[in-house]
Image: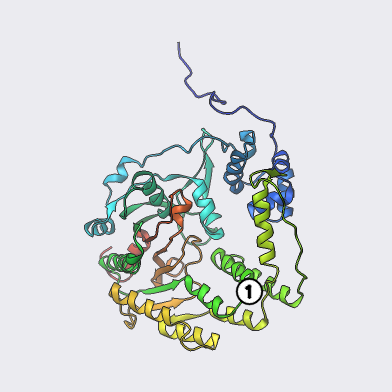
């Protein structure tokens, strides 16, 4: 007699279908259309469509977590099977990956980086929460039979950070190296593969005194791996995202305007729209709103939101009431965003836009020290170093240095390596305190193509 050992459709340890069995019911329970629109960062009209058509896959994990936190009993089917309770399962990397070392990975481990192996399947939440909009829409998302929403890893930085937090969170400083497949959706006809190999390094939890040294080591190690493959003609494109904040500070903007521009700069996709909105607000100023605070226990809920959350939103609205840009300020920001070229020339151009010689003096020193420590000569015509003020914004978790290595002859696949600093990522992933981090990765198929194109040893 054969026995059926297939798991039942409704395991005993899963909460039974509850009273919230439709998207419409969940939206009402979370405070209504406007409240859910704010939670997801979308328009109210989109949420109205969710009432009729159900939630999109990109909203499953976020809403499932919110419902779990608020103790709502939601049918699994509402979020496409994404469970609203239970801890993410711990997954292991395939054993075959542990013995597969490329030349790049071997070089990194020879430099003292410890190999780190992570699963291809990853919990979707960290990627949904921390990747920028452009990268987030390129995730391959699915739900496993246990109800957890997963994705195929789009890069190896977040998986490596999660592995560090799971196994080495008490280590003062970690130097990790990895190699493996990553997956990103590409628009039809883009001429780019949707799966590719990466090799890279991460330096995690380093003290502040090591930051410049670590940035130089990562940049130098990535460049050395590129050159070891026979690639000798390339461009290094750099940026430091803190430069934008320094630029805004010099423009003497209101606090609310500065925050909105910084948020849009890091989100990248809607920057121009935010700029136009701020211009319109300056041309048609609205009187400040006199909004009263809500009294009561900050943890108490009103229409699905805590009093603390409501009051925090009031503070934010009041701080942004004086938002707006003059045409001169907007023109200066547009000019800043277009700057690209040799580092010293771009810094001088920024000072010209600001009308203040010496305004970027700290950045002059920073770039000189970084390149000198990394052993890079920005005057080498075969390997020029350019500063681009809009560089590095696709990965929304970058907080400081961002860089890419380009081989222009590869056209759409010209970016063969990239990296940057991400000092707030690990805490957002569960670290008890902020942990500084810097890393870089090489797209191995593109590196091989560049090597073959330049006659090197792939």
From where the camera sits, is residue 283 visible?
yes
Question: On the rendered structure, is 424 left or right of 56?
Answer: left
State the image quarter where residue 443 is shown.
Answer: bottom left
Viewer-nearest residue: 271 or 189: 271
- Residue 247: give x, y in percent of width and height: 53, 78
Where is residue 7 shown, x and y percent of the image? 50, 24
Is 16 in front, or is 449? 16
Q: Which residue is mark 1?
A: 254
The residue lying at 46 percent from left, 15 percent from top is 3
Q: Say whether residue 321 is left or right of residue 238.
A: right
In the image, residue 231 lies at what x, y percent? 30, 70
Query: What is the total number of numbered labels drawn onto the structure image?
Result: 1
Residue 109: image x %, image y %?
Answer: 24, 56
Above or below for 198 versus 404: above
Q: Residue at x 45, y 48 (%)?
A: 430
Quadrant assignment for the C terminus: bottom left
- Tell me the crowding category of disc 1: few under 14, some 14 to 19, or many 20 or more residues within 10 angstroms, Cα based: some
Q: How is the image coloured?
A: rainbow
């Amino acid at each position: 007699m054969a026995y059926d050992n297939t798991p039942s459709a409704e395991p005993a340890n899963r909460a039974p279908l509850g009273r919230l069995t439709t998207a419409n019911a969940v939206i009402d329970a979370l405070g209504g259309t406007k409240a859910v629109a704010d939670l997801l960062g979308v328009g109210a009209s989109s949420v109205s469509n969710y009432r009729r058509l159900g939630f999109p896959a990109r909203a499953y994990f976020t809403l499932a977590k919110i419902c779990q936190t608020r103790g709502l009993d939601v049918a699994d089917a509402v979020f496409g099977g994404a469970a609203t309770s239970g801890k993410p399962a711990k997954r292991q990397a395939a054993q075959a990956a542990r013995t597969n070392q490329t030349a790049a990975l071997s070089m990194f481990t020879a430099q003292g980086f410890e190999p780190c192996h992570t699963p291809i399947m990853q919990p979707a939440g960290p990627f949904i929460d921390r990747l920028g909009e452009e990268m987030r829409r390129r995730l391959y998302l699915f739900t496993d039979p246990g109800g957890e929403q997963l994705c195929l890893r789009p890069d190896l930085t977040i998986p490596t950070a999660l592995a560090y937090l799971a196994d080495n969170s008490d280590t003062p400083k970690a130097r990790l190296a990895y190699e493996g497949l990553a997956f990103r959706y590409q628009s039809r006809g883009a001429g780019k593969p949707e799966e590719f190999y990466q090799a890279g390094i991460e330096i995690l939890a380093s003290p502040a005194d090591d930051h410049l040294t670590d940035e130089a080591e990562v940049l130098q190690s990535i460049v050395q791996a590129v050159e070891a493959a026979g690639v000798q003609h390339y461009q290094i494109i750099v940026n430091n995202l803190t430069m934008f904040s320094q630029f805004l500070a010099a423009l003497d903007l209101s606090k609310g305007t500065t925050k909105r521009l910084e948020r849009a700069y890091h989100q990248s996709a809607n920057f121009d729209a935010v700029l136009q909105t701020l211009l319109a607000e300056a041309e048609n100023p609205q009187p400040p709103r006199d909004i009263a605070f809500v009294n009561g226990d900050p943890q108490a809920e009103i229409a699905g939101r805590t009093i603390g959350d409501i009051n925090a939103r009031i503070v934010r609205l009041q701080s942004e009431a004086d938002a707006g840009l003059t045409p001169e300020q907007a023109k200066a920001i547009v000019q800043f965003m277009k700057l690209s070229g040799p580092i010293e020339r771009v810094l001088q151009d920024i000072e010209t836009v600001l009308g203040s010689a010496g305004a970027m003096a700290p950045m002059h020193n920073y770039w000189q020290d970084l390149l000198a420590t990394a052993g890079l000569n920005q005057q080498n015509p075969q390997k020029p170093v350019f500063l681009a003020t809009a560089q590095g914004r696709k990965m929304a978790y970058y907080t400081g240095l961002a860089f890419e290595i380009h081989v222009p002859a590869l056209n759409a696949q010209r970016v063969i390596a990239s990296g940057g600093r991400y000092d707030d990522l690990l805490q957002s992933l569960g670290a008890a305190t902020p942990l500084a981090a810097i890393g870089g990765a090489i797209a191995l198929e593109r590196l091989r193509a560049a090597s073959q194109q330049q006659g090197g040893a792939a």
